[in-house]
């Protein structure tokens, strides 16, 4: 399969406060798939039921992208710090996750997508981490923080296949997080960051070896992302080409 079809769930640009910047954000995810040989299939909350059904049936992989907060009711909590909640997107991505999980196809979650996978898999979120956000993308340089990648995890082998690294610096564009006690059953933490709220999970992978990964940072924003994260895009697209290639 030369160009695997990868569904990319996205925010509706026209509904955002800055539609032009939102459209540029959307394009970065599609470009991340396309430059490594995948065929991105964009879906958002305006996609019809028929479009969703067709896309889910034909997809070879799923990318859950960044965006607004997941409604806390999905993990059994009242609103205690969540903002800009997008319930239409929650519905779309819950259905996409269920379809991907049922078929065992590769899934990658970025920022909100990382959080959504954790919620859909039975975990929870810390609804607000004080002082952990950055200047909004498109309005200046990104804030960054160090991340400790766990040696021996599959993420560590993807990022540094020829050597052992312990830390790297990533962008900070989120105000919600996953703590150790919030992590869903079946997910293994592969990266950590320190915060005023304690250690936070910055990445996870499926404990059973399935290709399910989530990263809290935004690797599609290449101006503020270490070059090693380009391998994550490449490995994800390669895994979507078929069972023999999945890692």
Image (spheres, helix red, strand yellow):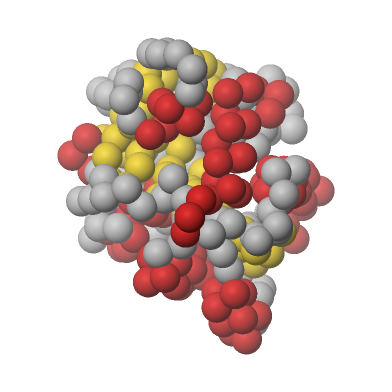
Residue 76 lies, in percent from the top left, at 23, 60
Q: Residue at x 29, y 35 (%)?
A: 189
Residue 29 lies, in percent from the top left, at 67, 47
Q: Determine the residue located farthest toward the bottom in the rendered image.
A: 50
Question: Image quadrant for the C terminus?
Answer: top left
Q: Nearer the viewer, residue 229 or 10?
A: 229
The quarter of the picture where residue 191 lies is: top left
Residue 179 lies, in percent from the top left, at 26, 35
Q: Residue at x 57, y 82 (%)?
A: 53
Q: Nearer the viewer, residue 229 or 127?
A: 229
Residue 176 lies, in percent from the top left, at 40, 39
Apparent side of residue 215 relative to residue 173 in the rendered image (left or right): left
**Is residue 140 at least partly visible in the picture?**
yes
Q: Nearer the viewer, residue 122 or 231?
A: 231
Apparent side of residue 83 relative to residue 29 in the rendered image (left or right): left
Q: Determine the residue located farthest toward the front in the rendered image.
A: 244
- The mark tally for this picture is 0
**Is residue 52 at least partly visible in the picture?**
no
Q: Nearer the viewer, residue 175 or 54?
A: 54
Question: Image quadrant for the N terminus?
Answer: bottom right
Q: Is residue 147 above or below residue 50?
A: above
The quarter of the picture where residue 180 lies is: top left
Q: Is residue 123 above or below residue 158?
A: below
Q: Determine the residue located farthest toward the right in the rendered image.
A: 20
Q: Residue at x 69, y 54 (%)?
A: 38
Q: Residue at x 35, y 42 (%)?
A: 205
């Amino acid at each position: 399969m030369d160009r695997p079809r990868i569904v990319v769930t996205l925010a509706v640009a026209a509904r955002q406060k800055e539609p032009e910047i939102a459209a540029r954000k959307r394009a970065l995810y599609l470009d991340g798939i396309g430059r490594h040989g995948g065929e991105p299939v964009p879906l958002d909350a305006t996609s019809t039921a028929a479009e969703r059904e067709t896309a889910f049936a034909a997809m070879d992989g799923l990318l859950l992208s960044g965006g607004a907060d997941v409604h806390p009711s999905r993990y059994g909590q009242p609103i205690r710090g969540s903002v800009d909640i997008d319930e239409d997107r929650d519905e779309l991505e819950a259905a996409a996750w269920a379809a991907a999980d049922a078929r065992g196809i590769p899934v990658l979650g970025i920022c909100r997508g990382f959080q959504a996978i954790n919620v859909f898999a039975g975990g929870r979120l810390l609804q607000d981490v004080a002082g952990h956000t950055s200047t909004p993308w498109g309005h200046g340089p990104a804030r960054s923080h160090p991340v400790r990648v766990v040696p021996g995890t599959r993420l560590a082998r993807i990022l540094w296949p020829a050597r052992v690294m312990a830390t790297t610096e990533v962008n900070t564009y989120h105000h919600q997080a996953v703590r150790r006690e919030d992590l869903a059953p079946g997910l293994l933490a592969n990266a950590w960051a320190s915060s005023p709220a304690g250690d936070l999970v910055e990445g996870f992978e499926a404990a059973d070896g399935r290709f399910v990964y989530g990263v809290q940072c935004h690797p599609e924003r290449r101006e503020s992302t270490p070059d090693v994260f380009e391998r994550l895009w490449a490995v994800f697209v390669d895994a979507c080409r078929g069972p023999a290639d999945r890692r």
